[in-house]
Image (cartoon, grey):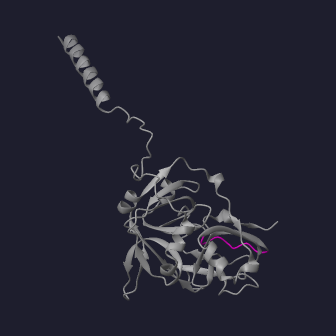
Amino acid sequence: MKHINYIIMTLVCALFASCMADSYDAPKDTGEAPYGNNSINEENVISIAQLKEKYATVIANSGMEQVEENIKIKGTVIGNDIEGNIYNEVVIDDGTAAFIVCIAQGGIYGILPVGQQILIDLKGLYVGAYGQQGELGTPYTNASGSSYVSRMSRFLWNQHFRLIGSANPQSVTPIEFDLKRISDPAYLEQNCGRLMTVKGVELASANGKAVFAPNDGTVSLTANCANRNFKGISSSSLVLRTSTYADFAGNIMPTGKVNVTGVFTRFRDTWQILMRTIDDIEPAQ
């Protein structure tokens, strides 16, 4: 009798397992990206340069305006939050210009790695600027009553972007920064937000002990960031900006001449280099 019961239980378990396997088959590959809005069509696409020109007055006045037209931009990710120095932002470039997209989401680099091309539906989002740095997002009003474009929710963002193909990091190449044009307003406007490399510079505070962004009161911080000066270059023209939350904030700054790559943003007329990873700084050859 026990033998018969064992056989019956074995058959029941086998049948149950078979049903479970049918119910939990692996999802089929539909060929669609697992994130974003795959229904966004590649129509009415304008260049980022055209976007900046269209909203030039808004950006110059650090204002903001909602996009009411059915227009889109397409670009490649050149910067993200992979090591924490760029926070709640992703930066895209389409070869004509670059723009910052503000998103209230951590771990953006996992979805939007460097080299990933994306299509963004602009209708309903806001174009504006903070310190004349062009940004895309939604309105935010701070405690003092000032309003500007800031981070959109990740749910809203998910409705407005579409992944195009797979990431190709090799497609992203920095532009060499021309120090001779550091005071050229047109150069500043044309290249703000782009991935650039400034070559053969020296960090003024590098002494073999000083770190990029200490949080111990030894360095004046603005918005939890340390601005490091370069020798022979006015701090009102160019600084290396590092967050105290960056993975490399506590790394010792290299001495001697270095090449520094990063996203070149602006705060009014001052260039700010935002390194993406510690590998963005290296000894000059």
Quarter of the view holding residue 157: bottom left
Look at 59% across and 54% down and name the residue there: 115
Position of residue 109 measured from the top left corner of the image (x, y, whole percent):
51, 58
Look at 43% across and 78% down and name the residue there: 64
Look at 72% across and 81% down and name the residue there: 230
Between residues 83 and 74, which one lies in front from this camera angle?
Answer: 74
Which quarter of the rendered picture does the C terminus lie within? bottom right
Between residues 113 and 193, which one lies in front from this camera angle?
Answer: 193
**Picture layout, residue 110 above or below residue 190:** above
Magenta residue check for 253: yes
Q: Give the residues drawn in magenta, as a range.
A: 249-256
Quarter of the view holding residue 125: bottom left
Q: Is residue 181 left or right of residue 224?
A: right
Position of residue 265 measured from the top left corner of the image (x, y, whole percent):
59, 75
Look at 74% across and 74% down and name the residue there: 178
**Picture layout, residue 172 above or below residue 223:** above
Which quarter of the rendered picture does the N terminus lie within? top left
Magenta: main secondary structure equals loop
Position of residue 98 measured from the top left corner of the image (x, y, whole percent):
57, 67
Position of residue 135 measured from the top left corner of the image (x, y, whole percent):
49, 72
Q: Is residue 265 left or right of residue 4?
A: right
Magenta residue check for 86: no
